[in-house]
Amino acid sequence: MQENTASLVEHLTELRKRLIWVVAILVLAMIGGFFAAKPIILYLMHTEPASSIVTLNTFSPWDAIRLYMQFSFAIGLVVTLPFALTQIWLFVKPGLMEHEQKATLRYIPGAVFLFLLGLSFAYFIIFPMAFYFTSNVTQSLSLTETYGAAQYFTFMFNILLPMAILFELPVVVMFLTKLRILNPARLKKLRRYAYLLLIVIATIVTPPDFISDILVAIPMIVLYEISIMLSARVYKDQQERDKQWLEETEGA
């Protein structure tokens, strides 16, 4: 009992150290992002859909600082992501076999790629669609469009970041399958509930019209199906390795 308690304390201590490192790198990346934010903000303000607005306003002396903080956090998050994923891998590494360690390490570049892909999908497809929809509704009511810069970019980040995180689904599923927490049979069993959840999320992040919901829900459902296929592949390799190990054990 004491050994189990000591082992748990050691694991929690190690986890705390890794979390501290992740937070430290995030803070440093945010500081760097604070200085890199200005050219990015100016660029986005002069591209669609922001360029279609007559002018972006500030409604508080803190709005400009708020913009800097939003972008520094976003930049810091992107920069810190590979390091955070590496720390997660190092934490679970002792519990994995050698071939599993090598296989899961390869997930890190894939996770970063999917995160950036999700950001791109959200920025170039979902965000303009949502913005122009809300703008058309405003114009239909004969209201004057006066946008605050902080509110505009908050609206943008509320769409981009959740979508980028959702695009991590295939890598997360493969990783959890490697850890034997998930398997394709369980994912198929949960399919109807997953579909419902994804459709609800698509409805939340898009304008309230059927076409927009479908345009976002379909890629997310496809991601879930890809996750099942990848999980099945990982699970099949596990079964073959387990069978081989069992045969070698019985032979010995």
Image: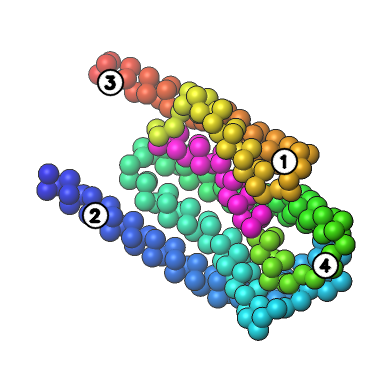
What crowding class fits label 2: few (fewer than 14 Cα within 10 Å), some (14-19), or many (20 or more)? Answer: few
The residue shown at (76%, 76%) is 57
x%, y% of residue 128?
A: 79, 54
* Three-letter code, disc 4: Glu
Q: Are marks 2 and 1 in contact (CB under 8 Å)?
A: no
Q: Is residue 50 above or below residue 129?
A: below
Q: Which residues are magenta?
A: 158-179
Magenta stretch holds residue 156: no
Q: Are marks 3 and 2 in contact (CB under 8 Å)?
A: no
Of label 2 and label 1, which has the lower sequence position? 2
* Three-letter code, disc 3: Thr
x%, y% of residue 195?
A: 60, 32
Residues at marks 2 and 1, CA–CA distance in whole angstroms: 47 Å
Magenta stretch holds residue 169: yes
Local SS, label 3: helix
Q: Magenta stretch: dominant SS?
A: helix
Identify residue for label 3.
249
* Three-letter code, disc 1: Asp
Marks counted in the figure total 4
x%, y% of residue 162?
A: 60, 52
Q: Seen in the image, is 49 located left or right of residue 188?
A: right
Q: Are marks 4 and 1 in contact (CB under 8 Å)?
A: no
Identify residue for label 2.
10
Q: Quadrant of the N terminus?
A: top left
| Residue 238 or residue 46, whichever sits in front | 46
Q: Seen in the image, is 45 located left or right of residue 78?
A: right
Identify residue for label 4.
145
Task: Tell me, for residue 213, which label it has, or none.
Answer: 1
Residues at marks 2 and 4, CA–CA distance in whole angstroms: 57 Å
The residue shown at (66%, 55%) is 160
What crowding class fits label 1: few (fewer than 14 Cα within 10 Å), some (14-19), or many (20 or more)? Answer: many
* Three-letter code, disc 2: Glu
